[in-house]
Amino acid sequence: MPHHPPSSMWLRAQALATLALLVLALPAHAQANDSTVSATVSNVHYDVRADRASLAMRRLHVTTTFDVADGAPVVLSLPAWTPGAYEISNFARWVSAFAASQDGAALRWDKLDYDTWRVRPTSAGRVTVQFDYEADSLDNAMSWTKPDFALFNGTNLFLYPEGRSLDFPATMSVTTEPSFRIATSMSAAGEPRHFRAATYHELVDMPVVLGTFDLDSTTISGRTVRLATYPAGSVSGERRATVWQQLQRVIPAEVLVFGEAPWDSYTLIQIADSTYPGASGLEHAASHVDVVSPVAIGSDFQPSLYAHEIFHAWNVKRLRPAEMVPYRYDRPQPTPWLWVSEGVTDYYADLAEVRGGLVEAAGFYALTSGKIAEIENTVPFALEDASLNTWIHPRDGTEYSYYPKGSLAGLLLDITIRDASDNRNSLDTVLRELYQSTYKQGRGFTSADFWGAVSRAANGRSFDDFQRRYVDGREPYPWTDALRTIGLRIQRDSTPRIGVSTAPDANGAIRVMELSPESAAAKAGVRVGDVMLRVGDVQVADPDFGAKFRLQYAGRPAGSTLPLTVKRGTETLTLRSALTYGPTAPTIVEDRAATPRAVRLRNGILRGTTGG
Ligand SMILES: [Zn+2]
């Protein structure tokens, strides 16, 4: 579903951790982690071997080496999840052939829980721990190999000492074929194919790809941006030029919101594979990884995906809810704020497209209309609840709905702030203030931080009621008033609906392929397989059927008699149906009667400006 951002972001090809597993896992896990502290380790180095032989077996060989001060037990764990992909995966399940040694002699080891190993050094000195990792998961939070390629995430491979600070520096090397390329945003360390990270958090936030792929770079907003695409040739020629043009437009528009490009360099990694349904991105502080179906390349969704994932470099990787600061890798970190981290990010992806000139205003309205339609077709839910629920992949129809609804909440906040401040401030003001006052101070944002910044931007207005109704509550959003404030309105398509989809058969007969439940046709008794002959007096086979039907019936009251004539087998039947309107999709259009002030606020949103 490449044109369906909310759910496509996290489409998963493989089975996911179940709720039962999560609930059962927590107590035992918490116990091991809370009661266990590893001996101190230092000079930590990780090596990932991915040569043709290991890739042929879809394996990465991971070697961790570190110094210990004595023979005290070292307790090492692998993460259970990758930040950004809010689900428990337990990467330890892909580990095999675990071994530990010191000075060439094997060390005793055992497991303390399913992702924690206890290694017993014999004395002070350097310890080596090794394992194989089965890298066969095509998922941007995981690790995947082909004979000429590998993607790995540090969360999958890199052990950390239990109960110790994760702010330890580490080095990492990749051992692979001389002809293979490597792309990552990790800082290079002295030797070729060696990298360094200031902390474990930084280390596991820098995915790596190696192998044969296309790689080039350019400068955008004063910093290097790299584009790594696999397989080689999947994004070439005109398509590659289009990607670069899209990045040249969305990145500066996003930089303007926060006033700085926060990375030294940025790496966009994209993997296309025909086994992958849809398109999905996973954000990092200085990179992101997209896994896409080849059909998503060059689609309208492509710039939207890039703009979304890149905006995350500020919103969630840096400006982050306090519940997720610092990340902890051994258990879920639920937060009621994913509607800001994901939904507001999605709002800014749309804004980056229109502000960067990739779409016209009408394109922005269409993206917004689509989100309104999506929420109209979802059961009422609260943004905070949907944010918290994501960890259990709820089956109530609201999974990932905090993307479109959070995006709409962003628009509603932006309108309200611009209205209350007479366009002196905007949602941009709020994000910029929070970025400075929380991220730059080394902390996450709280409810008081967020609503305080919103209120200050909106001339001191209280948002208690807004929060209660539209964020913690399930009330529909007041689009009529809100859109009027910025000179827009919702137009509803008033074409009568019959409720069938048809296709011509081999003889050219218009045959019913699908019936919408509760539609006029379904209620009249039309069946899949019937040949549609006439709707009222209008011949269905007429090339101008649509226009003639609308001319005759649009505007008649709902419930008016509408005979449907079908051929079923050899019989011709005339079924009585009632004229039915809807469901009607909302379309946002500019209001011709908009005041100059409304137009000024609207242009502020579309252009990223405030004031006059
Ligand atoms: Zn996202």
Image (cartoon, helix red, strand yellow):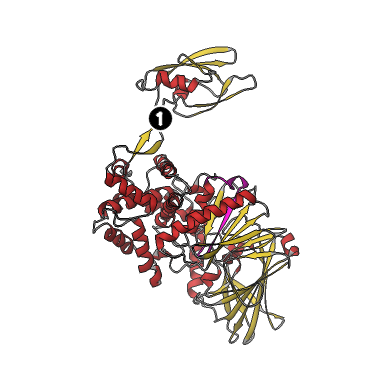
Q: Residue furthest front?
A: 612
Circle 1 SS class:
loop
| Relative horizontal placement of residue 223, taking residue 425 as reference (left or right) | right
Q: Position of residue 187 (x, y in %)?
A: 57, 72
The answer to which image quadrant residue 180 occupies is bottom right
Task: Give the magenta-colored segment's residue range.
Answer: 284-300
Q: Residue furthest right?
A: 53
Whether residue 341 is situated above or below residue 130 in the rendered picture: above
Whether residue 209 is situated above or below residue 197 in the rendered picture: above
In front here: 524 or 318? 318
In the image, is residue 298 part of the stretch drawn in magenta? yes
In front here: 264 or 8? 264
Residue appearing at x 24%, y 58% in the figure: 459
Specify few, some or many for label 1: CA neighbours under 10 Å numbering under 14, 14-19, or 20 or more. Answer: some
Residue appearing at x 47%, y 73% in the figure: 34
Q: Is residue 102 visible?
A: yes
In the image, is residue 93 part of the stretch drawn in magenta? no
Residue under pointer 1: 582
Q: Position of residue 10 (x, y in %)?
A: 52, 52
| Relative horizontal placement of residue 245, taking residue 583 as reference (left or right) | right
Residue appearing at x 41%, y 25% in the figure: 496
Q: Position of residue 256 (x, y in %)?
A: 41, 60
Q: Is residue 578 visible?
A: no
On-image quarter of the N terminus: top right
